[in-house]
Amino acid sequence: MSLLAPSPADAQRRVGLRRMRAVALGLLVLAAIVYAVTLRHDTRWLGYVNAGSEAAMIGALADWFAVTALFRHPLGLPVPHTAIIPKRKNEIGRNLQDFVSENFLTDEIARERLAAAHVGERLGVWLGAPAHRQRVMTEVVRVTRAGLGRLSDDDVREVIADFILPRLVHEPISPIAGSLLEGIVSQRTHHGLVDLGLEQLHDWLADNPGTFASVMGERAPWWSPPWVDDKVIGWSYQQVLTWLEDIRLTPDHPARVALDDLLERLAHDLQTDPAVMERAESLKERLLSHPQVPDTAVGLWRSFSAALETAMDDPTSYFHVRGDELLEHLGQHLVEDEPWRSRLEGHLGEAVSFFVNTYGSEIAEVISVTVEQWDGREAAERIELHVGRDLQFIRINGTVVGALAGIVIHAVSTTLT
């Protein structure tokens, strides 16, 4: 099978090549006719015409030979240094590879062209249009949906069980968890979660006094009178509600301070205390080694993917609305925030530079490898199809310049004699 598949534009190129060949050949035939008609001239000016037509034929034939020799043997004769492209296509491919590698795939040129393109600003302006942001979201949905469709539950379970969990089991987590907890406590990030927990616990107790009374009643002494139990349980219930409300409304409550101190000590011990670190790692290993963990992870993944599929199907969902907002915000930053745009383009330049320096030679090598796979004759035909039309102008110019040169030479010869 041919490696050079024809394109729809080849038919048009072939018509153009044939037309220019006909023009060049027509000029050669015209020069030959003029030469034959004026060969036995008896006037001075016909001598100029005859000399010009003779030189035009010589120029046309010489340039026809030069153009034809690039692609095949002229008239099928194995003249040396003809059919250059079929014979030396591999060398031409290597030279083209070196030319591209040295003059295009370089760090300096890549950075220069990237800077001249103003990618950041143009991208920001482009994202300013709602239709363009919608197009981006459409592509994100398409790619995400394709990715989700290729991941089965068995694939997810295999990745989790064979790759993620074993690495987590052997990877020390105590220092990381301690550092993360230390940052959370120092920035008081956990206060919102504490407030939410207190509020939910308070509301649950307020809505379920019977459950509280049942639990407390089971722990009451068997010998205490029921009316005493009711009094104690009722008083305890109100005290717990008041205590939870007090903690929730008082930022510097002793219970909050005690919790912060406990978390700070835990964060410190997770990073420095060998005993605490060992217990944390042991707990982590027991948890991750439980046979139910992969199934639970797959269930979470299934719920996540289903929710994501539903969100992607609904243009009014948070997924689409938030995605559009993020893209709009990104576009505004790229247009209005010059320092931020410069940093982004700088990082992009570094990425392009790394890519060119690392893979530039391999990219350029594709040229020589591809050319070596071509059939020589077919490659010559395809190259001629693309550039042959312009090369026919060489024949036309050779005919015209030859005629002018012949007239000048004839005029000089006549003058000197």
Image (cartoon, rainbow, N blue to C red):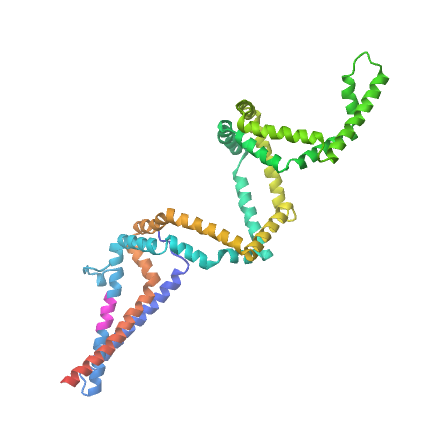
Q: Nearer the viewer, residue 198 or 19?
A: 198
Q: Measured from the top left, where is residue 349 in percent x and y?
A: 44, 52
Q: Quadrant of residue 200?
A: top right
Give the left or right position of residue 228, taking residue 372 as reference: right
User: How far across and down, in percent of the image, does residue 263 sit?
Assistant: 62, 30
Q: Is residue 275 above or below residue 374?
A: above
Q: State the image quarter where residue 376 is shown.
A: bottom left
In front: 138, or 108?
108
The residue nearer to you, when weighing 2 against 272, is 272
The residue at 53%/56% (across/down) is 338
Residue at 19% in and 87% down: 44
Q: Of 339 and 394, which appears nearest the observer? A: 339
* Residue 122 placement (x, y as % from top left): 52, 58
Q: Which residues are magenta?
A: 58-65
Q: Is residue 415 above or below residue 167?
A: below
Q: Is residue 57 left or right of residue 162?
A: left
| Predominant SS along the magenta part | helix
